[in-house]
Image (tube, helix red, strand yellow):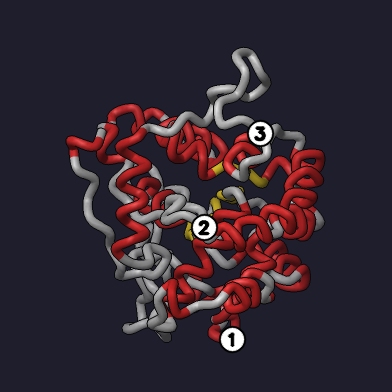
Amino acid sequence: MLTFLGIGAQTCGTPWLDANLRRHPGLYMPEGPPDGPSDGPSDGPKDLHFWDRHRHRGLDWYRGHFAANTDGRPAGEITATYAGLEPAVIHAMHETLPDIRIVYLIRNPVRRAWSSARIALARAEMTLEDASDAWFIDHFHSRASSVQSDYEHCLRRWTGVYPRDHIHVELFDDVLADPRGVLKRCARHIGIDPRPFDDMPDETLADASTHGPGDSIRPSLHAHLVAHFTPRIRAFEDYLGRDLSVWHRQNGLLPATPRRGAKGAGRTATRPGLLAWFRRAVAANDPETPGGSPPRPDRDDS
């Protein structure tokens, strides 16, 4: 039934990934529920939410989303909340989908937590001036936000069920710096031909909803987030076996420009036009909610 799942994390670029994977001619992704309107404002053609909200509808309902894939193309769906699924649900998924490939986008948890809180602020129809530090800190440490920011905890749950080589992790920083490279790596992991992404123009690769860094984090809150997440980032580096100095630099713990020849130096240099577009997307609306569509990137930003 499915070849792959995108599992999150929230505010880490899953709408961008979804929109660009849909452009691949060899991949099928469902366009929406086959039985009419969805159950809520956060459901839609991207986030099916079967495994965390709609299991009571049964597997036939889930399979129905893929019934139009009559030519047997590799198929999948992306729901950004799946990363935080409980182990029992992941085990149930494995019984049905033992061979799926999983894609997981992550970003600096300091920025992810801030972006998530800013979305909650907008949904509450509050402004930055309305919200105290205590309001933000309560949101940062809420269960929903904490789970989505704890990448190691999520990965340990998933790798406790699926082989580690079934799970492909990409950084949001690399989405900004090399979107084509990210898509080609994801394609190879899923098992589809990466070459169609070579034919897509650069501006097309940016034409999707995702979250950029957004506005500056309030200094008092930045200090709180950095103190909270720095030990976790360091532990996650060891677990993942990957240099995450780009996050430490963003958090002000390392020089903004890495030393020439330093490990990982230059890997995530962001193209200014792409970053500017992502920032406008955050200012315009909540791109994680289906139906929201930020403005198209201006060509003169590239």
Viewer-proximal residue among 48 and 213: 213
Judged from the image, the secondary structure of the residue bearing numbered disc 1 is: helix
Badge 2 amino acid? Ile
* Residue with the mark numbered 2: 217
What residue sits 62% from the left and 45% below the top?
A: 251
What residue sits 68% from the left and 72% below the top?
A: 141
Q: Residues within 10 Å of mark 2 (few under 14, many from 20)?
A: some
Q: CA distance from mark 3 to mark 2?
A: 18 Å
Viewer-proximal residue among 168 and 254: 254
Considering only order in the chain, which callout, 3 or 1, is on the residue closer to the N terminus? 1
* Residue with the mark numbered 1: 56
The reply to whether residue 92 is visible in this rendering is yes
Considering only order in the chain, which callout, 2 or 3, is on the residue closer to the N terminus? 2
- Mark 1 vs mark 3: in front: 3
Indicate the position of residue 56 as horizontal and vertical percent values. Answer: 59, 86
Badge 1 amino acid? His
Q: Residues within 10 Å of mark 1 (few under 14, many from 20)?
A: few
Quarter of the figure that contains the C terminus: top left
Answer with the quarter of the image where residue 194 lies: top left
Answer with the quarter of the image where residue 260 lies: top right
In the picture, the disc for residue 133 is none
Viewer-proximal residue among 5 and 262: 262
Q: Residues within 10 Å of mark 3 (few under 14, many from 20)?
A: few
Q: CA distance from mark 2 to mark 1?
A: 40 Å
* Residue with the mark numbered 3: 254
Indicate the position of residue 4 as horizontal and vertical percent values. Answer: 55, 52
